[in-house]
Amino acid sequence: ASRELFVSLRGEVGGKLRDEHTLVAVFLSSNRSYSRAQLVQIFFNVIAVELVCECMLYSAPSNSAHAEAAALDEAVSGLIETGVPPDSAYSRVRAHPPSVADASGHDVVTFILTSLITSAVCLPAMITFKQLWFLYEAWPFRRCQR
């Protein structure tokens, strides 16, 4: 009984994916409720909304003031240890500050949260774009335009 349930569920999910997923439906759909051009337009509209969401959630990596101060202190200390007077060492380091490497890398949690927020915005956008095509097809004066 559980095998039959799994097979029927797999068939339903596969059929929905084939007919409703905008990228897969372009190539595999037998149900032509949308033309290929409409599906491609819906797909790229959703991609555009996703890019806008990603741009709004983007924050540039920042070098912390603490890391910069630590690098300056280390450079000044190194010069003082070699016998350079402290005032001269400080002025040399200020003239040519050391570069601070960003060691934070990619934060997985930030990536996952950004993806979830973007998906939460894009799903209603995709439904809206699909409904706009239904409204276009059901427009009563559309027949008069042809």
Image (cartoon, rainbow, N blue to C red):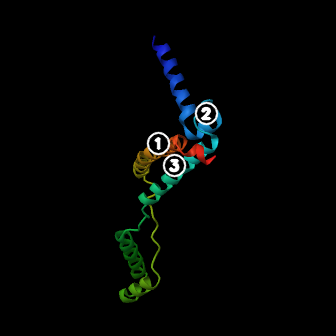
Type of residue at label 3?
Val
Spatial CA distance of label 3 from label 2 is 20 Å
Q: Are marks 3 and 2 in contact (CB under 8 Å)?
A: no
Type of residue at label 1?
Ile
Spatial CA distance of label 1 from label 2 is 17 Å
Furthest residue to the top?
A: 1
Q: Is residue 91 left or right of residue 27?
A: left
Q: Are marks 1 and 3 in contact (CB under 8 Å)?
A: no
Type of residue at label 2?
Arg
Q: Which residue is mark 3?
A: 46
Furthest residue to the left?
A: 66
Sequence-first disc among 1 and 3: 3
Assess disc 2: are there few (<14), some (14-19) or many (≥20) residues with their C-alpha within 10 Å of its C-alpha. Answer: few
Q: Secondary structure at mark 3?
A: helix
Q: Residue at x 39, y 72 (%)?
A: 68
Q: Secondary structure at mark 2?
A: loop
Q: Position of residue 102 (x, y in %)?
A: 45, 64
